[in-house]
Image: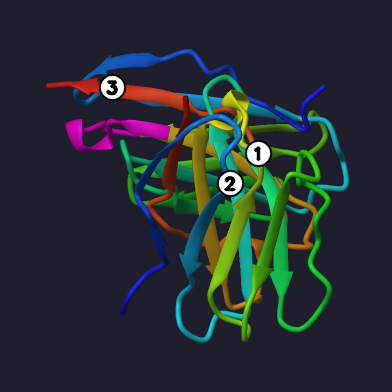
Amino acid sequence: GAGVSQSPSNKVTEKGKDVELRCDPISGHTALYWYRQSLGQGLEFLIYFQGNSAPDKSGLPSDRFSAERTGGSVSTLTIQRTQQEDSAVYLCASSSGQGPYEQYFGPGTRLTVT
Amino acid sequence: QKEVEQDPGPLSVPEGAIVSLNCTYSNSAFQYFMWYRQYSRKGPELLMYTYSSGNKEDGRFTAQVDKSSKYISLFIRDSQPSDSATYLCANSYGNNRLAFGKGNQVVVIP
């Protein structure tokens, strides 16, 4: 079946602009996660959605970052007033919620802030 | 101190050699221990997971966890060029949030 998809695959933006990154999870998966992967920092948790529960936003690095999940499916990660340090690969994962070991990752969006 | 420490140095081995990777972690509350493989320009994919101390084998791969010393390892036997990738260890408290190490880039030379 179809895996997790993310768009765009690459995004180049100017410092100060807002960007939106999209994630389409595997159909039927109730849990959705956003991570950020940057050189020197590895993969860092950003935010986690589970069903209709309030999201776990504990990993968001600043209030410039926000995410929403509409209808329990598609999610959008928004970064406002982008900074050069936001340059990274943003990865989305989804799972059926049975356990932390079965997160399926998308290919990521490579964000470059110039 | 990061929750999961993984020496990110690259590793080059000849085909057929044993690859040995390891991580340490700081929080004894971690319940699940995972290894992911990530090819260039792709998302990570789960290789193996375990939730107890000891060894777990899957084909050429062995995951080892020592909870008393907070140490996890991955061994790849009879390494192949197709094993060339970045390997990431990850731990979880059980609330589904994962804490990752920085990853080891492995190159298997034919």
Front in this rendered view, residue B27 or A65? A65
Name the residue tied to disc 2: A18
Dot 3: element? strand
Please give the label number shown on residue A81: 1
Q: In x, y percent, where is residue B93?
A: 80, 54
Whole-percent x and y of residue A17? 56, 40
Q: Are marks 1 and 2 in contact (CB under 8 Å)?
A: yes
Chain ID of residue with mark 3: B
The residue singled out by tag 3 in the image is: B107
- In which chain is the residue bearing label 1? A
State the image quarter where residue B72 is shown.
top right
- Examine the structure image and report whether residue B12 is included in the region drawn in magenta: no
- Residue type at tag 3: Val
Local crowd at mark 1 within 10 Å, few (<14), some, or many (≥20)? some
Residue A72 seen in the current view: yes
Q: Counting other residues with Cα less than 10 Å from the Cα at mark 3, is it few (<14), some (14-19), or many (20 or more)?
A: many
